Amino acid sequence: MGPVETPPRRAEELAVIGKRLPKVDAWGKVIGETKYADDLILPRMAHARLLRARHPHARIKAIDTSRARALPGVLAVITGADFPPVKFGILPVSQDEEALSTEKVRYVGDAVAAVAAVDEETAERATELIEVEYEPLPPIMSIEEALAEGTVRIQEYGDGPNIHKLVSLEFGDVEEGFREADLIREDLFYFEGSNHLPMEQHAAVARWDPDGKLTLWSSTQTPHYVHRTLAKVLELPMSHVRVIATPVGGGFGGKSDPFSHELVVARLAQLTGRPVKCTLTREEVFYAHRGRHPVLMWVKTGVTRDGTIQAMHFRSILDGGAYGSYGVASTFYTGALQTVTYKVPRYKFEGCRVFTNKPPCGPKRGHGTPQPRYAIEVHLDKIAEALGLDPAEMRRRQVVEPFSKTANHLTITTCGLEECIDRVVEASGWREKHRRLPPGRGVGFAASSYITGAGLAIYWNEMPHTGVIVKIDRGGGVAAFCGSIDIGQGSDSVLASVVAEVLGILPEDIRVVTADTDLTPVDLGSYSSRVTLMMGNAAKEAAEKLRGLLLDAAAKKLEVSPAGLVARGRRVYLRDDPERGMSFAEAAQLAEAAYGTLAAAGSYRPPRRGGKFKGAGVGPTPAYSYTACVAEVAVDPETGEVRPLEIWIAHDGGRALNPLLVEGQVEGSVYMGLGEALMEEQIFRKGLHKIPSMLEYKSPTTLETPEIRTILVETNDPEGPFGAKEAGQVPLLPLIPAIANAVYDAVGVRVDEIPITPEKVLKGLDQKGKGQEPRVGPERFPRVSFPEPIRVESAFGQPADLSLKRE
Amino acid sequence: MRELLTPRVNGDDVQVLAPVHKTLLEVLREELGLTGTKHGCELGECGTCTVLLDGEPVLSCLLLPVECQGREILTVEGMAQAGRLHPLQQSFAELGAAQCGYCTPGILLAAKALLEHNPRPSREAIRVALAGNLCRCTGYTKILDAVELAAARQGR
């Protein structure tokens, strides 16, 4: 079965979709007019600073704020006692955070008090006058320590003293699969954590009005969840809280949690009667974190001689940091998507997330999947070598079947991965280069898949995941309202383009109003690559309702059937006689006269297609996106430096609604993957971040970023608006293992640990020179008491059931 | 201690009384309301706060306004002339070179300085000129493309 052709209209009929158009918000950005959260300056605005813990783990014995209060210019000083004793957290199962810590601090950077003052300097000085008496507790700083420690606990909940979550699932009998294998290979990998490093530091501004209503402006990817959290923690009705997400200056997952400073400015605004702003410093951004989990991984795969996978067993241990954050979901994600790229008929996954006294980890671009993708793609590279097979060809033969189910009951719709592989192999000259380049030069291959929006909301409910309202005024002006927030990915442009396409106007004719909980219908947020598909479907539904009214009204006037009319080019006219028709504005006036004020809503809830077992909630999505990548590198044997020379990347994101924006997502993902592959790491010494500044935390500049050759492979997915799928995350995943495999091709050293630093390459070369195994990476996987797996029959190879479309 | 500062900002003679220890970045954003200039690292590392001082790119987070007395400062707000976008602003918008847009003002100004010295730069020369400006969204590809497009248009 190949991709089905079910476009709403034929491609050649589309006027906006598929065109390389500028982003609707680009103009404000290039003239410096776009107002990010820290650009907001309100009359009488006060400034807040947080006092953060200097101990990684300590009990708070006393806090004395009297000296801070006495400092001239200080307006208010608060501690955890100034909040109701209500904990919060992004996931309902991990409500473990406080606005300001009351009993304990769990990492260096945990907020314990806050000051509002007339200016930032005074607020900062006042925080230094707050005296906190701590009783230090033994810090737990690594996976090994967390697993070994039985008495000292960081959190009082979880699946073990310092184990947040244990997961064990088996789909089909993996032992049977291993018995049928000709080759069984086991490997260990480690992936260091990294920060999102958005260019914009988080900021929030709060204002209380005299009628008791709170407004919060914040650089957040999830205004809806911030809205819920403010109401919960401040014990306010949600109807009295308004959250406006300001344009986000880079998120990548790092602004997806509700944060301490957002709650603090709200409380301080209430106490001072002034608007209050708090902008984090770059150092605080490193400590606020929620970035990539460090993950230790073990994988065992059994294959037949031709490389066909018979069974896979995968284990992960995530170093979660001090709080839950998205961690339960992250844990499942390290295991859930292994089956979505290649055919894996039997699959077992055991996952474990531990608490440590470090900043909490959370979702970063790819959320929980870049680490296992790296492990598996390097593991398969080793298997291909052992079998004497071309690693790209071995994978190509095992690409999942479109419109089928995986072992763990995930439903695949379209899959363009085969073509992606062919295209990068061709474009890069893979066959001529692999194992054929001179010493020090190499190419590596890898592929990946990712979700287009999580199938389930973070908190379970029957309501839509997103809603769009479209309104048309008498002059033909169109406004589209949605709770979605543009974080640079172009969601405002997608909203305008979809509505414009349906109504037959242009994106610049549309005013988008987004991310304001008072004005816009709920959208769950810019995470899990959900916005284009979900918001796009809702926008399409709303706009189609209005188009129906416009065509009906125009048809009456023209005395024709509405079925014979089209809306296009800012006109409504007869398909067979384009001269007969009227302007879009005239059709709007006729429709308003006939039907009243023109507004319509659309909403979207993803299909419920997951399995019926516990843990089936993570992994399902309306559609999976696919990417294949070839990286070419040069490795300097003297310094160990790895220089990426060129990247070829082919991406199946369904139909590209705007190829310019899709390419931008692919190129940005490649860039971020390069940083993780080669240099970025969030590392600690004695509880302190070793490099919490942009001076020391290295990320690629123009000079380290090679030319990126992007190829868009378009499928036409029945689930997406106009056939669109995901673009913002999947292209990051294959980049990292492609680099690792290229390093091996170049110098014969396996670096089974990310990042691939010069030191590790040199160590591997040194071992190679001494005749030892040229491998650098983890040596052992600690003992974890995983529970007996939940055993579920493998659904591998079953046909997709698309009738379960929308319940 | 405050001092009367008299730089020319975006072509206007400006007078502002500001604390002497405030950086040019802070004075632009907080005293003059020119929030188009951004901050990213507080250390002169990320390039986000780049402005032009007498036509040369400088990091406004490392500069004191007293060093700018009587000198010409250009921020992103001053790039468009009489409502006409600078060719770089036009090409950045057209080619999707601004994603989140936060690094964009600094990169536009660094690129403007480059094109004034070198109207037809090679891709490598653009890379070198922008090496001090981090962008976390684009992978730089569309930014390099946009500078090339603006250069080609200016050269016509």
Image: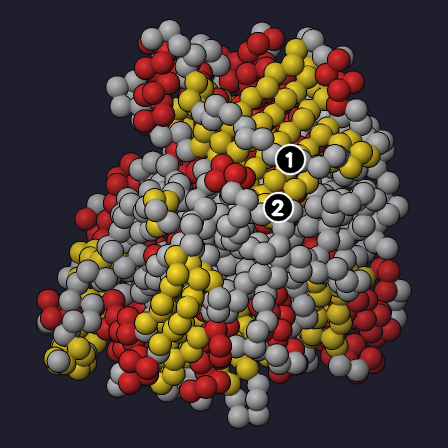
Residue at image location 29% in from the left, 80% down from the top: A67
- Secondary structure beneath label 2: loop
Question: Percent x, y for residue A18?
Answer: 62, 47
Residue at image location 34% in from the left, 20% down from the top: A763
Q: Residues within 10 Å of mark 2 (few under 14, many from 20)?
A: some
Q: Measured along the vertical axis of the image, is residue A418 above or below residue A534?
A: above
Residue highlighted by disc 2: A160
Three-letter amino acid code of the residue under disc 2: Gly
Q: Residue furthest front?
A: A151
Quarter residue A764 falls in: top left
Q: Are marks 1 and 2 in contact (CB under 8 Å)?
A: yes
Q: Which numbered marker is on residue A785?
A: 1
Q: Residues within 10 Å of mark 1 (few under 14, many from 20)?
A: few
Please tell me which residue lies in front, A58 or A122: A58
Quarter residue A284 falls in: bottom left
Q: Measured along the vertical axis of the image, is residue A542 above or below residue A317?
A: below
Whether residue A554 is visible, yes or no, is yes
